[in-house]
Image (spheres, rainbow, N blue to C red):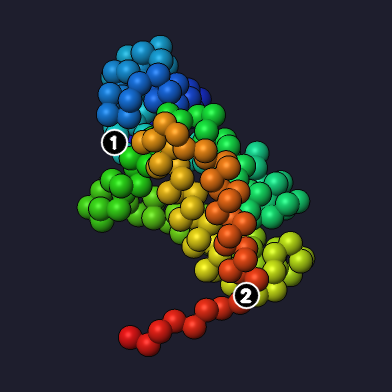
Amino acid sequence: MPVSVDPDLRARIVAAGIFAYRAADFHQVGPEEVAVHADITVEEFRLAYPVWELFIVAVVDRWNTATRQILRPIAEREGAVAYVRARLETGEGDPALVRLRIALLSAASNPGHAAAGWFRKQYARSFEDLTLTLARDVVMGREARGTAPRHGAEQLLALYEGLQLQSLLRDDVDLLGGYDRAVARMRVGWASGPVALPAR
C-alpha cells in the first residue's frame, strides 16, 4: 500500500529545492542539501520524492508556473516580443534557475531520461503558446501582416535560448540590448513576408 505524503511537506521541499539551487551549482545539489534547506531528514525527503527526477520536475514546474503567471499579462497587453524579453529579464535576476533549466534541457533531450516526456511536453507547450501569441499580435496589428507566427516563434525561442546560454558563458553579454537589436532585425524580415527557400 503506497505511503501517503503530506502535500504541504512536498511543497516545502520544492521551495527548499529552489533555495538549494540558488545556493549551489546544479551538480552539487542532492537530497542532503535539499533536506538541510527544508529542515527535514534525508529519509523524509526520500519518502516524499523517492525518484529524484520527479523532484526536479516539481522544482522546474513551480518556477515555470510562477513565471508564467506573473508575466502572462505582458503577453496579453504587449505581445510575444515583450513577453520573451520579460522572461529574459526575469532570468537575468535568477541565474541559478536559468543554469538549472539549461542543464535539464540537455539531459531531457535524451529519450532515456526519466523525465524526458514531461520536459518535451512543456517545451512544446511553450512553443505553441508563443506561436498563438504571435498570431494574435499579427491580427491586432502589433506585428507586421507578413509575419509567419510559427517561424517567428522559432526565431524568438532560439534567440531566448541562445542569449541565455551566452549570458552564462560570457561576461560581456548585453542580454536585453542584444535581444532588442536582434528583434529589430527580425521584424524587418517578418515584414517582408515568407522567404522562398532554394530547391534541394
Q: Secondary structure at mark 2?
A: loop
Residue mark closest to the camera, 2 vs 1: 2
Q: Quadrant of residue 145?
A: bottom right
Q: Position of residue 128 (x, y in %)?
A: 54, 62
Q: Work out whether 11 lies above or below 198.
A: above
**Which disc number belongs to residue 51?**
1
Q: Residue at x 40, y 41 (%)?
A: 166
Q: Nearer the viewer, residue 165 or 139?
A: 165
| Cα distance in 3D space between marks 2 and 1 | 50 Å
Residue 24, can we see it?
Answer: yes
Q: Are marks 2 and 1 in contact (CB under 8 Å)?
A: no
User: In the picture provided, is 74 more to the left or to the right than 118?
Assistant: right
Q: Is residue 129 above or below residue 162?
A: below
Residue receiving disc 2: 192
* Vertical relation: 170 (above or below) 197: above
Quadrant assignment, res 60: top left
10 Å neighbourhood of mark 1: few (<14), some, or many (≥20)?
few
Kindly identify the residue that appears in the image at 35 percent across and 47 percent down.
Answer: 105
Comparing 72 with 140, the one in front is 140
Residue found at the very far left of the displayed protein: 112
Residue 81 relative to residue 37: left or right:
right
Q: In the figure, 67 relative to 142: above or below?
A: above
Q: Residue placed at 52% from the left, 40% from the top?
A: 175
**Residue occupying image coordinates x 60% and y 48%:** 180
Say which quadrant the N terminus sits in: top left
Quarter of the picture containing the C terminus is: bottom left
